[in-house]
Image: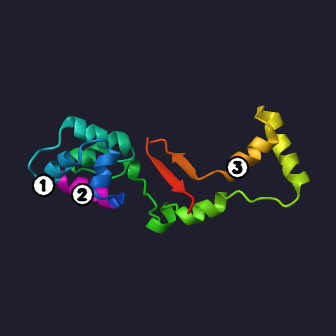
Amino acid sequence: MIDRIKALMKFENLSSSQFADEINIQRSSLSHVLSGRNKPSLDFVMKIKHCFNDVSLDWILLGEGEMLVDGVNKVLASPNENQIHDKSFLEAVSIKSVDNDDDNSAETDNVTGSNNLASGDNYKHSVSGVHKILVFFSDGTYKEFKQI
């Protein structure tokens, strides 16, 4: 089973620390399992199945069948394609100032009118003061982007 856990980590491109964090166990527990000191508990295996639900339990427990349920092949993208680079992300979502005050006030009025926000001047001030963006993922993790 240790070899299959290592194969899953390699398949998902995760280090042991990342894998332990992903399945919500202590890093030392994973280290003990991978070194052969401890055998994986049912809770350990169920946490793997919960986080990686496309992985076959028969494969994890018994080594039978395919790694993925129904033989679904996962397309592996290069790590660069899966990661959001801070600089490119900030460039993509950067808020550009508009020289024409009429256009800017119209955009502000539209936003404030639909959401009952404070006056347009307060909105302009808050946009220029953005210094950090937090992106929350469904697995409970988050990524922080700070202005350089």
Image quadrant assignment for residue 121 = top right
Task: Determine which of the numbered discs, if any, sits on residue 143 in the image.
Answer: none
Q: What's the CA distance linking mark 1 and mark 2?
A: 11 Å
- Whether the magenta-drawn stretch holds residue 19 is answered as no
Reply above or below: 108 against 85.
above
Task: Give the mark, 1 or 2, whose residue is nearer the N terminus.
Answer: 2
Whether 46 is drawn above or below 21: the answer is: above
Residue found at the far top of this picture: 116
Location of residue 143 in the rendering, given as x and y in whole percent from the top left corner:
48, 51
Residue identified by numbered label 1: 35
Select label 1 or label 2 by which is in front: 1
Amino acid type at circle 2 is Lys
Identify the amino acid type marked 3.
Val
User: Is 5 contained in the magenta span?
Assistant: yes
Please indicate whether residue 28 sits to the left or right of residue 85 in the image.
left
Q: CA distance from mark 3 to mark 1?
A: 51 Å
Q: Main secondary structure of the magenta part?
A: helix
SS for callout 1 = helix
